[in-house]
Image (spheres, grey):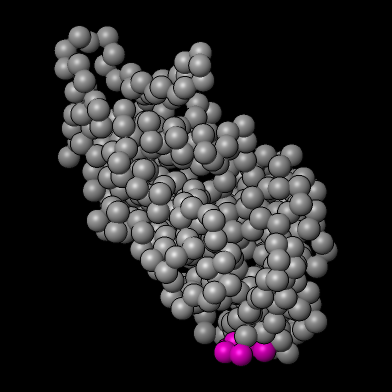
Amino acid sequence: MGRLLVVGNIAESPFSADIGYYLRQEEHYSDLVSLKSFLNGEFCPRFIVDEASWENIGRKLESYTVMITSTAMSGFSRDELAMRNFLISRAAKDNGADRVILLEPDLFYSAQDRGPRPEHGATPVKRSIQDYKKFDGQPFSARLYADLLKESGTDEVVTVHNHSPSVEHIFMDRFSGYFTNLLPCDVYADYLRDSDIAEVDNMVLCSPDSGASGFCLRLHKALNNPGVKMLKMNKHRSDERTVDVSLAEDSPADIADIAGKDVIVVDDMVRTGTTIIECCRLLKSGNPRRIIFVVTHFYSSREGRITLNDPIIDEIVTTSTIPQILNRDMQGRLRHKMVVLRLGRWISNAVTGLRGIDQASLPGPLYTEDISSKHPRWKGRTGPICGQ
């Protein structure tokens, strides 16, 4: 088994630092590749492994597996970061790397998981003419991103909580099955059981739309508590800012079942927060004890922060897949009800079994809780709290 090199596509990334540390890499990730740009603005990475040697020029990464860690960060557009991924992958392969793995928790271009024609995407239900029209004139970006990663030399892609069947189909095809979608069901289940955020025997899980229902079922199974009921919602979006939410006909539970309960609304990502607020307004009519929003990928936009600051939501639990949310300024006023679960250790454990990575798994905890002192549940904690 060759040696693992963990590198990042930017110089200062708390996510890359966490992955390198938990995968027991002695060198700092930024000391393994120079992320330079020419005066004309073109990016040109350069691996600096054994750079003093004049032997094996162009082959110094032979027997290495290179893992590129990539997350959205302020100061860089996703387009810039994607291009950096292509060039770092190509640099690794052009210098002999055996294998290149892209670890990108929030997989870029996943929103464009289908295009304007029937052959553009694999969806679980038949597409309507309105759905085709939604993508009319646009590129099938998810497929292009997969194609370009493959062409650049990437052999395998790892992401976290991508709910699109079309994206999974594309990447499984392009990478011959070497696509892993890590689902943090165990992390959320542990946090809901072990923390003081909710009463574990008084919970109801809620999927805000059909796309989230599969993950909600998985979380229900991970909780291993048959007493926890489930609500399923449907949404209808008439435009970018107008959403109608209603109880799904096949919902296992009814709104009347949530009186006095802690309702956990679960989704993969949030941008504007419009759907979640409409969902929570409907839930509030059932007189729950608390409403907690659990979301894996949190895009910290000004609009989203304002929308989600509505008192109808008691707490928000998210993760470090988009690490800028760890910045209190990016949380804004939400810091008084937000918890961030840092997933570096959990992700590192999950990737240890991948081809080209031969390391023993780390013992628990699975996550680290990052919580502001402004949060009511902080209770004088002196630092991040680890899950048990």
Residue at 80 percent of width and 68 percent of height: 312
Most prominent secondary structure in the magenta stretch? loop
Viewport quadrant of the N terminus: top left
Left or right for 178, reference 301: left
Res. 31 in view = no
Give the magenta range: 249-254
Q: How far across and how far down the image is residue 314, in percent? A: 76, 64
Residue at 62 percent of width and 52 percent of height: 298
Foreground residue, 350 or 109? 109
Res. 133 in view = yes
Q: How far across and how far down the image is residue 277, in percent? A: 75, 67
Is residue 227 inside the magenta stretch? no
Q: How far across and how far down the image is residue 133, in percent? A: 57, 66
Figure check: 29 above or below 383: above
Left or right for 74, reference 279: left
* Numbered circles on residues, count: 0
Figure check: 32 above or below 279: above
Foreground residue, 250 or 1? 250
Figure check: 149 above or below 25: below
Residue at 51 percent of width and 42 percent of height: 71
Residue at 30 percent of width and 48 percent of height: 156
Is residue 253 inside the magenta stretch? yes
Figure check: 35 above or below 20: above
Residue found at the far right of this picture: 311
Foreground residue, 343 or 139? 139
Q: How far across and how far down the image is residue 124, in percent? A: 43, 75
